[in-house]
Image (spheres, helix red, strand yellow):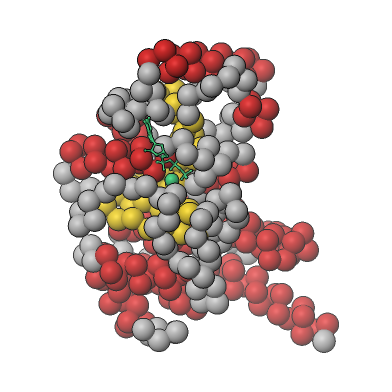
Amino acid sequence: MPIQPTTQELSFLIQKSSLGEKYSLAKLISLLERSNNFFTRKEIFYILKNLPCKNKLTVGFTGTPGAGKSSLISELCKEFLYKTVNEKVAIVAIDPSSSISGGSILGDRTRFTIPPREERIYFRSQPSQLEMGGLNPYTYHVIRVLRYFFEYVFIETVGIGQNEIEVSKIVDYSVLILQPFAGDNIQFIKSGIMEVPDCFVINKCDEKELASSSYHMLLNSLEFLKDTLNQTQIPKIYQTSVLKKIGIQELLDHIIQQKPKKDKKLEAISQLERWVKNEYGKWGLHLLQDLLNKKKFENYETSEEEFLNIINSLLQKKN
Ligand SMILES: Nc1nc2c(ncn2[C@@H]2O[C@H](COP(=O)(O)OP(=O)(O)OP(=O)(O)O)[C@@H](O)[C@H]2O)c(=O)[nH]1
Ligand SMILES: [Mg+2]
């Protein structure tokens, strides 16, 4: 595949991907992950616009390192295969252990036990931009592509705090996975992210006693916060064990009942702002807001192109 594939080649990849061919999909995603490939991306989304988008729900799974996120997602997927008939799920794992140049490697941290030839499940690992597992700059575009081909897209990221907030911006539903608490101090209550997750999971509830005390500790904290934050109700808490296969069905039932709540245009604008802020700082953000006030937002690539034209003409004038 040349650096700049032709429209025909891209259409071919997209057609094959929509028929469930994983190799073509992997190629398509790799094209998106190449940093300097704006025109290819624009072309990809232009072609995709003519296809129906399959996606019903995008779900984010975040949580403390080693809480069992990958293991739990694997179990949820196996359950998903029983529960649904023709639907498909794509998993994107943001892998903090692989380097940017390394691409998708299945390092120690990615413990997925999904049958590799299963046609209804697609797995992709993405190197993280940050040491702790923050979103890659291309994650959003990869998710947008996957939404065309899969009813469900699951994203795994490591860490709570900023990552939790970042991932919540590109998903319809956020699940925070924790391990049973050893002490009586819930450290994350201080981190100000308790209001971000839509639901909590305490995984590794293999032992009833520890599971129950952790559950009540979390419940108390959430009730305390509910009053201080003036919320009407607290999010659901699930207790699961991958080891003993507890709570998996209930959690999956709950997840697939959810409705998409995000306005995809607002989501696109927020991701465009995120990119501009990272690349050009407050100055860029100011120019973008000016542009968005004057011109109706159509789609990510159109606004990105208009923004880059403004930047280029300003830089030319300066020289
Ligand atoms: N006892 C017990 N161990 C579990 C359970 N779920 C996962 N584990 C173990 O916990 C360890 C970490 O599991 P992972 O699924 O890799 O956890 P993770 O949260 O994805 O880890 P990172 O991606 O590295 O943050 C593995 O050794 C799993 O076998 C569970 O329900 N009970
Ligand atoms: Mg993992």
Q: Is residue 215 above or below residue 154?
A: above
Q: Quadrant of the N terminus?
A: bottom left
In the rendering, at what x and y percent does residue 285 appear? 72, 60
In the rendering, at what x and y percent does residue 303 appear? 58, 67
Residue lying at 45% horizontally and 77% vertically, measured from the top left: 40
Q: Quadrant of ligand 2?
A: top left
Count how many numbered circles sit on residues in the image: 0
In the rendering, at what x and y percent does residue 100 appear? 53, 66
Q: Which residue ends up furthest to the right in the rendered image? A: 318
In the rendering, at what x and y percent does residue 268 appear? 53, 56
Q: Looking at the rendering, which quadrant does residue 237 occupy?
A: top left
Residue lying at 52% horizontally and 45% vertically, measured from the top left: 158
Q: Looking at the rendering, which quadrant does residue 26 occupy?
A: bottom left
Q: Nearer the viewer, residue 250 or 100?
A: 100
Q: Nearer the viewer, residue 188 or 109?
A: 109
Residue lying at 52% horizontally and 33% vertically, measured from the top left: 197
Q: Is residue 120 above or below residue 81?
A: below
Residue lying at 30% horizontally and 38% vertically, measured from the top left: 76
